[in-house]
Amino acid sequence: MRIFILFIPLLITPNLLAQKDIDINQKVDSLLNRMTLLEKIGQMNQLSADDMETNYELIRRGLAGSVLSITNPTVANKAQLVAVEESRLGIPIIIGRDVIHGFKTIFPIPLGQAASFDEELVQQGARIAAIEASSVGIRWTFAPMMDITRDPRWGRVAESLGEDPLLASKLAVAMVKGFQGDNLSNPDAIAACAKHFVGYGAAEGGRDYNTTLITERGFRNLYLKPFEATVKVANVATIMSSFNANDGIPATANKFLLKDILRDEWGFDGFVVSDWASVTEMIAHGFSENEKQAAMQAIKAGVDMEMVSGTYLANAEKLLEEKKISEENIDNAVRNILRVKFRLGLFDNPYVSSELKNVFYAPAHLEKAKEAAEESVVMLKNKNSTLPLKKVKKILVVGPLANMPHEQMGTWVFDGEASHTQTPLLALRKQYGEKVKIDYEPVLKYSRDNDISAFNKAVEKAKKADVILAFVGEESILSGEAHSLSDLHLQGAQSKLIKKLSDIEKPLITVIMAGRPLSIEDEIIQSDALLYAWHPGTMGGPAIADLLFGKANPSGRLPITFPKEVGQIPMYYNHLNTGRPPTGNDSQLDCIPVGALQTSLGNTSLYLDSGHEPLFPFGFGLSYSNFKYGEPKLKEKILSVNDTLNVSMELSNIGDYDGTEIVQLYIRDLYGSIARPVRELKDFQRVNLKAGENKVVHFQLPISQIAFWNINMEEIVEPGNFHMWISRDSKSGEPINFEVR
């Protein structure tokens, strides 16, 4: 087994890196000059691994630049052998795969990882995924997904990093660095792919693949932020265009985004790949008349490689003949693709090495997956310190998610194995079963089960237990691509089960495993404690068990707002204030007299039935510890646009447990040339404190980081007055003032 070491920095100077790029570009140009037109177009063609015998012939003829989803190293080596030794120019292929939150060792879904607010751990998770995936020949992953979304109905919210552009940017950069490692040419590095470019998470009604209507200012101030960070900070190797049409223009043909911004403004020099068949789907959009026109539009817009739909290979020669595309369009695309192949070291080392075997489920990998699962869990309620469990002799475990190894891995898990997944039930029995009697009654066979015939049996068992642990949520297939929902309540009879158990005078602890925020207001009320565990991956069971018994202390915070009910969506913390901001949050229905005359005087922006506040705000999460925030102290309250805001605050752990607090820094620009959000996250820190310990937390925020795209479409800091909070979530804390002149 190869020794597993995380993040050994390479001593490569910027000058050496620059020289390496010069050398690579020279090699690219030399190779490009020897290629026929058909070989160039072949590099722009990506195949699926469904029919490898056909693929081998296309590769042999130089008609494939990449193959999707080869997971057998023998097949990978054969495909590379055909490319390198049997094709005319010996250009290796790139083998790609959706390695989203782990390959074999499955980490929490990305939305769960975002709840950790832990860049280092997220980077380590991606590094482990790269090590495992590269061992079978995969050198390219279609991750991270950094689509900002404010709609939990969207199935792919599970893949996202939440609603906030700063958090998403930091964690996307961490993932890219983890996948690509310190040197992309190392055999255990894989090229990352920033997706989906761009705006996909704003699909109307949360319906996957649907329409968006985002202004240029909206793109620049929100949706583009994580992509820009991965390009400029992490040197992401590839970008994937998205499915959606924005303002009628499919992203796969949006030259403004793919060329003007991505290439010309940001200087991106990797390659752009279409999403699965998104080129031909422009016909269904009504944007392209046929496949030939779709190919022309995508090539001219800057999509370098086409995923599986084959229109480039079928039409590019003819389009060039008809002067509908130029040879420069083709050459630029192929340069970008070859550049990445050279950076990956594929020309020097195309094959899977036998030394890279046996890395699956390494002890160090499993330990990191457990740590990630622990940090991702968010405690939303803990009435009367029900948790951690103390002095219990008999526990009843119920619910369909208590012992479902496949379901707890979550969406986009092609290669994870249920046989290696450790469930909460098995972990509880293994880790605590000698001291506590653990009874189990699933009651429901799966999350959508409506059969309540086992309810009475569960109630009788619950009466004899000291505490009830209910594991509910949603099966993994209910979130992810093409799995949007209009009703976010617990599926099946799960809510009925929680209500039935809550009527028994025994402590009820609810653990929810899900791929999205669910409508759980009733479950919050009915439970004595509630842990939101997302889909926690391979090691979710041991992580949850240790959290329940206090061996670990919850530290996760919500990366996305939890609405009370679907009718409040979209609901997000960094909203604008409106001209009539709400002043209360209670339902007003009962206050309206029967026969009242119509009036709008004094009314504010809220729902009459559900108010204006969410169930839980962005950044919220509880701990077994109790943290006291001191008054923030600004070094200077008047600053220039070139200064740095220096602020400190004393944090005290006044509880009985060692714990971690995620301290969050927010600002509000009180007025500007355009209306500004009521709060914006600008920094955060994970602070570890032992019980009784104090620590001064320092933040240094360059004023340049509060710039925005203003009314004149300029990215600048506008002088003015600001509020700043150091708080535990996006709703708490008292503001202090500072001024930028």
Image (tube, helix red, strand yellow):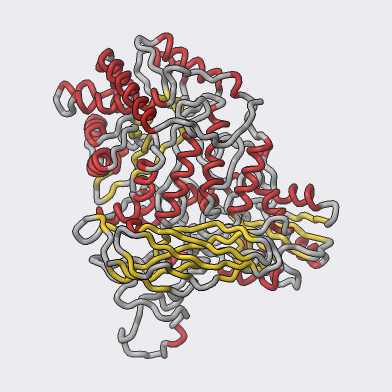
At 26% across and 63% down in the image, what residue appears?
718
Q: Position of residue 252 (x, y in %)?
A: 29, 39
Foreground: 714 or 617? 714
Q: Position of residue 495 (x, y in %)?
A: 61, 64
For the C terminus, the quadrant is: bottom left
The number of callouts visible is 0
Q: Is 681 placed left or right of 674 in the picture? A: right
Foreground: 664 or 156? 664
At 51% across and 20% down in the image, what residue appears?
76
- Residue placed furthest toward the left: 323
- As displayed, is residue 708 above or below residue 628? above
Q: Position of residue 726 (x, y in %)?
A: 48, 67
Q: Is 310 placed left or right of 157 in the picture? A: left
Foreground: 455 or 727? 727
- As displayed, is residue 290 above or below residue 195? above
Snapshot quadrant of residue 419? top right
For the N terminus, the quadrant is: top right
- Residue placed furthest toward the front: 635
Q: Say whether residue 392 is visible.
A: yes
Q: Is 438 placed left or right of 297 in the picture? A: right
Q: Say whether residue 465 is visible.
A: no
At 65% across and 48% down in the image, what residue appears?
540
Snapshot quadrant of residue 341? top left
Q: Position of residue 259 (x, y in %)?
A: 24, 39
Foreground: 83 or 638? 638
